[in-house]
């Protein structure tokens, strides 16, 4: 079948495309190629036999053509890390872009629309194990607009077969976001900010792709919202230790207090964001050291058979191996 993937030049979208192409499906990715990594991901998909459509989800005419003939749509495109952009940019991409995709998918007769949301809709996340019924309290423009995007998907339930996936922090081969962490530990240049006891409930890319495919093909998924995470949460300290083992480096011992870095991040945002400059340090980057998440995946397990298989330690080893193969560490 023909499968369309927005955000297809990003990490998750491109790895999903490569897996589906390997399974013999036709794949059309829709995304931007403004950055070297996006261009590289697009080239990898094209080399594997995928079709690349360079377009934004804000371009409604382009979306109509890109979704023609598609049976399944994975909508993964989002404005996420652009700390130098005004709030309107997040609204335009995460809310209006989702509405554009829904309209185009309905017009194209798409059979299943899988919407990639985020655990960011839960805000700080502190306070026990969260599930799909836990209160949503997004605390930044990204989380707020992704929650609005979920509402747009829910409004289309009568016109499309939809599924909402709240995606956890994702890592694995192909990921460049955690590359700085792996590289910093490998080069002995990383230090922990804060006590390092906050929890990360990450998901390995292959497990996430398995879950996304279940959402796209299982009848019980229709109209549902699922959290997809990995096997168990790990603390920041545990993450650092496992990555150090994976890259063959000593565990970083230096720890610095969190409050001064939060103050500096807020100051840099206030000074640089109005100028359209990406701050080298911003509060969302500090979330790595302060936000704490633990999730239940009981709904996904019981209703669509989702079973994550890769623990963080094994995933870190495979990720480090990919970084070495690519000459990145």
Image (cartoon, rainbow, N blue to C red):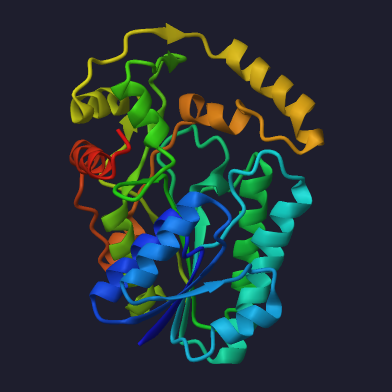
Q: Quadrant of the N terminus?
A: bottom left
Q: Is residue 31 visible?
A: yes
Residue 75 pos. (x, y %) = 51, 68
Please name the residue shown 35% across and 48% down the image. Answer: 296
Extreme residue toward the right, this view: 274
Please name the residue shown 61% across and 48% down the image. Answer: 143
Q: Nearer the viewer, residue 50 or 254?
A: 50
Q: Is residue 159 visible?
A: no
Please name the residue shown 42% across and 35% down the image. Answer: 128
- Residue 315: image quadrant is top left
Residue 50 pos. (x, y %) = 38, 76
Q: Relative to residue 257, is residue 100 drawn left or right?
A: right
Please name the residue shown 19% across and 38% down the image. Answer: 317
Residue 282 pos. (x, y %) = 63, 28
State whether residue 97 is above or below residue 143. Answer: below
State whether residue 219 is above or below residue 68. Answer: above
Q: Nearer the viewer, residue 45 or 152?
A: 45
Q: Relative to residue 21, is residue 69 drawn left or right?
A: right
Total tally of numbered discs in the picture: 0
State whether residue 80 is above or below residue 206. Answer: above
Q: Quadrant of the C terminus?
A: top left
Q: Nearer the viewer, residue 305 or 274?
A: 274
Residue 172 pos. (x, y %) = 30, 47
């Amino acid at each position: 079948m023909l499968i369309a993937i927005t955000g297809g030049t990003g990490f998750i979208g491109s790895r999903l495309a490569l897996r589906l192409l390997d399974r013999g499906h036709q794949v059309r990715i829709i995304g931007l190629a403004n950055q070297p990594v996006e261009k590289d991901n697009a080239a990898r998909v094209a080399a594997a036999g995928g079709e690349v459509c360079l377009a934004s989800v804000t371009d409604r005419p382009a979306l109509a053509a890109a979704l023609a003939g598609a049976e399944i749509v994975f909508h993964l495109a989002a404005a996420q890390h652009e700390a130098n952009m005004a709030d309107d940019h997040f609204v335009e991409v995460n809310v209006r872009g989702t509405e554009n995709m829904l309209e185009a998918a309905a017009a194209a007769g798409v059979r299943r629309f899988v919407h990639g949301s985020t655990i960011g809709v839960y805000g700080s996340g502190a306070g026990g194990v969260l599930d799909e019924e836990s209160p949503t309290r997004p605390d930044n423009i990204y989380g707020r607009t992704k929650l609005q995007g979920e509402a747009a998907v829910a409004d289309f339930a009568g016109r499309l077969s939809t599924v909402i996936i709240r995606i956890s922090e994702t890592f694995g081969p192909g990921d460049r976001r955690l590359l700085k962490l792996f590289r910093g530990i490998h080069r002995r240049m990383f230090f922990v900010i804060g006590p390092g006891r906050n929890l990360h409930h990450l998901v390995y890319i292959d497990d996430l792709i398995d879950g996304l495919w279940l959402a796209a093909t299982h009848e019980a998924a229709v109209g549902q919202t699922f959290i997809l995470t990995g096997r168990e949460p790990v603390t920041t300290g545990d993450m650092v230790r496992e990555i150090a083992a994976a890259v063959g480096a000593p565990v970083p011992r230096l720890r610095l207090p969190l409050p001064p870095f939060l103050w500096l991040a807020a100051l840099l945002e206030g000074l640089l964001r109005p100028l359209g400059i990406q701050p080298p340090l911003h509060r969302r980057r500090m979330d790595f050291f302060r936000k704490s998440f633990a999730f239940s995946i009981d709904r996904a397990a019981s209703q669509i058979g989702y079973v994550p298989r890769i623990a963080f330690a094994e995933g870190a080893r495979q990720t480090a191996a990919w970084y070495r193969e690519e000459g990145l560490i």
